[in-house]
Amino acid sequence: MIQSLIVSASMQQIILSSGPLYYRQSGTGPPLLLVHGWGGSSRNWQYTLDLLADVRRIYAPDLPGYGETPPLADPPDAEHLAMLLIECADALELETFDLIGHAFGAGLAAYIAAYWPERVRRLVLTCFSTFRTELERRMVEQTHRQMGMWMALWQPWMVLWEPWMALWQPWMARMGGMKPVYRAMASHFFYQVPADETMLREGVADFLRMDQRTALEGALSSGSAPITDALSRVTAPTLLIGAQQDKIILPSSVAVVAHLIPNCQHIWIDQCGHLPMIEKADEYHRLVRDFLLAEA
């Protein structure tokens, strides 16, 4: 069982029509494209980059405004990001590929599978839901708005605090460091918060440094009608993985996705929060591996 994240895939860069896009790459074999969720980065896929490297050549981009990739001049909606990912696949010479998305990134992945069906061999959607009613859509939209406002409030203070961290590091080490702060923030995303302080610190840093306008646009478009409408158009074999204790995505709405997508297999992971590829890495990647290697 993996105990901590290992940064085994160094960051690389390609230039797209929108500007530079950074990504991580590992492994050999048929191509696999990973799409992170709102507030994350390619760092969310570090276990995947390690655990599936023996069966897939893996690419994990940072979407614009997240991780290392700079934001676009105008914050993109979901459809624009999907087209950007297709441009990324073209630049990497990925004619066909398996595709895995997480949360907001799963919506982008579903949109790609629906409107570029000839490109996607197999599709994995992780912790992704749609909405049974307009009330549910508005509730989740409001939650994302609040998270975006919270990030906007804290981001300037974290930027000011960062230069002092090195000076305070010896004292903080004796007092237990910032781990309680990281754990409190991470508790929204995990059922059981991992003990690895480095992973928590880097995850919180990714969340706080995402571009504010990009974050707000992403929150608003997470339940967009084009993505919901795309689900019934998906023809690729699809695996939908939900987490029973997810505090971000409504588990009750995950089953709606399974109903809308033809040829969709739906599996739950128990005692797990919003990031099963990290919190339940062994179980998650066993499920994904079996699905990707299954006969068509």
Image: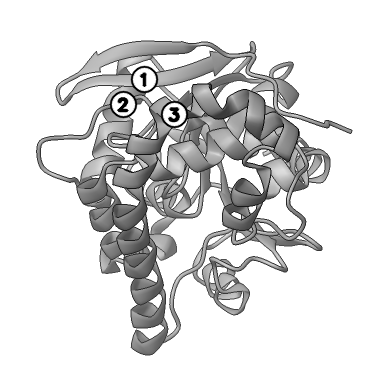
SS class, disc 2: loop
Of labels 1 and 3, earlier in sequence is: 1
Q: Are marks 1 and 3 in contact (CB under 8 Å)?
A: no
Q: Which mark is residue 231?
A: none
The answer to whether one can see residue 241 in this image is yes
x and y, in percent, of residue 226 in the image:
27, 62
Q: Residues within 10 Å of mark 3 (few under 14, many from 20)?
A: few
> Which residue is label 1 attached to?
22
Residue 170 versus residue 25 in the image, above or below: below
Under tag 3, what secondary structure? Answer: helix
Tag 1: Cα neighbours inside 10 Å, few (<14), some, or many (≥20)? many
Disc 3: which residue:
164
Give how far apart the Cα atoms at labels 1 and 3 are.
Answer: 28 Å
Looking at the picture, tell me which residue is in the foreground, 270 or 52.
Answer: 270
Q: Horizontal and vertical percent for residue 96?
A: 46, 26
Contact flag, marks 1 and 2 (Cβ < 8 Å): yes
Q: Amino acid at mark 1?
A: Tyr
Q: Quadrant of residue 191?
A: bottom right
Q: Position of residue 109 (x, y in %)?
A: 43, 45
- Please say whether residue 44 is visible from this viewpoint: no
Residue at the (56%, 21%) spot, across then down: 58
- Residue 170 versus residue 50: which sits nearer the camera? 170
Mark 1 → mark 2, Cα distance in angstroms: 5 Å
Between disc 1 and disc 3, the foreground one is 3
Colour style of the rendered protein structure: one colour
Q: Earlier in the sequence, mark 3 or mark 2?
A: 2
Say which residue appears at 34% left-offset and 75% top-offset: 142
Please state if 121 lies on the left or on the right of 170 as rendered: left
Q: Amino acid at mark 3?
A: Trp
Residue at x-position 43% and y-position 77% = 131
